[in-house]
Image (cartoon, coloured by chain):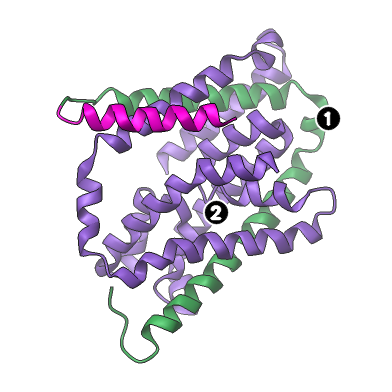
Chain colours: A green, B purple
């Protein structure tokens, strides 16, 4: 499982060493790989009748999770805001 | 926004291809996705390592605002722990793995599919896309209700690219560096946190 993270760290070292070179091909490569992987995820979902049947439930679950995540991070940000700028105006 | 639509398009295309069995089932169950994931992470690393400009910009950051990414991560994970009580069929670790996507839907859903299966991967994809869309649409309200830092926290890993324009528009231009720094740190934490919660 940590093989994947190892690849990222190796990529970072390589990128740092190659920083003087033009690496314009990296971003198109990243996009293409992301598209391919999401296509494969779709393939797995679409080919699994149990998953297709529960897509609506999964969507509802996702919405609930998102709502909670937004509430949690907003409250945490508000607490930091309050702590930093209670006495003065908001400045970055 | 266009990028998100293309990504959703590929996911839907895959769903259709799987549903109508246009490709042999062996493709989905093979190791291709693992190798592609390794190549993807290597590419992500290359793009981070070769761009020293981003790191240099952070010198002008107010050091106390360096806490913001930690607040985002802590707030989201706490909320995920709470929501796991409402979803009895999910363990707290699974909910936290989904939440650890922080809007970085492509990477988090791919990771979670690899380690926990396509069902939780789909929840992660939908939930993290929703997080980005909600930030894009809700920023004006978030600023009014919770202060200027709230849209940055909600944007999660997306605040260095897709949600940056809307944040600077409604919270103000002076938050650009904070937003970039926040996006960078949260973005970087995604593979580590998702892997960690998937391994619990």
Could you tell me which quadrant the N terminus of chain B lies in? top left
Residue at coordinates 25% horizontally, 48% vertically from top-left?
Answer: B54
Report whether B5 appears left or right of B18: left
The residue under label 1 is A50
Give the dominant element type of the magenta stretch: helix, strand or loop.
Answer: helix
Question: Element at badge 1?
Answer: helix
- What is the number of the mark on residue B131? 2
Quadrant in which the C terminus of chain B is drawn: top right
* C-alpha separation, residue under disc 1 versus residue under disc 2: 26 Å
Q: Residues within 10 Å of mark 2 (few under 14, many from 20)?
A: many
Residue B119: percent from left, percent from top: 73, 35
Name the residue: 71% across, 27% down: A45
Magenta region, residue range? A1-20
Residues behind callouts 1 and 2 on a single chain: no
Q: Chain of mark 2?
A: B
Residue A19: name its quadrant.
top left
What SS does tag 2 mark?
helix
Write down the chain letter for disc 1: A
């Amino acid at each position: 499982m940590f093989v994947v993270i190892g690849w990222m760290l190796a990529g970072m070292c390589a990128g740092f060493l190659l920083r003087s070179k033009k690496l314009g091909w990296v971003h198109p490569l990243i996009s293409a790989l992301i598209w391919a992987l999401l296509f494969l995820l779709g393939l797995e979902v679409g080919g699994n009748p149990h998953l297709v049947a529960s897509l609506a439930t999964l969507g509802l679950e996702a919405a609930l999770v998102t709502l909670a995540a937004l509430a949690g991070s907003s409250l945490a940000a508000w607490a930091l805001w309050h702590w930093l700028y209670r006495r003065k105006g908001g400045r970055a | 926004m266009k990028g998100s639509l293309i990504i959703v398009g590929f996911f839907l295309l895959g769903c259709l291809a799987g549903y109508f069995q246009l490709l042999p089932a062996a493709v989905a169950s093979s190791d291709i996705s693992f190798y592609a994931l390794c190549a993807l992470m290597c590419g992500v690393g290359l793009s981070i390592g070769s761009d020293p400009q981003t790191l240099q910009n952070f010198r002008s950051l107010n050091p106390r605002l360096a806490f913001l990414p930690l607040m985002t991560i802590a707030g989201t994970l706490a909320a995920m722990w709470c929501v796991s009580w409402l979803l009895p069929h999910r363990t707290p670790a699974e909910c936290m793995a989904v939440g650890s996507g922080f809007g970085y839907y492509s990477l988090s859903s791919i990771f979670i599919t690899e380690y926990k299966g396509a069902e939780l991967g789909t929840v992660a994809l939908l939930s993290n896309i929703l997080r980005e869309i909600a930030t894009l649409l809700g920023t004006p309200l978030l600023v009014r209700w919770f202060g200027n830092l709230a849209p940055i926290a909600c944007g999660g890993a997306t605040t260095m690219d897709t949600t940056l324009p809307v944040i600077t528009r409604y919270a103000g231009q002076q938050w650009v560096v904070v937003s970039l720094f926040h996006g960078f740190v949260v973005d970087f934490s995604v593979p580590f946190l998702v892997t960690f919660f998937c391994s619990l």
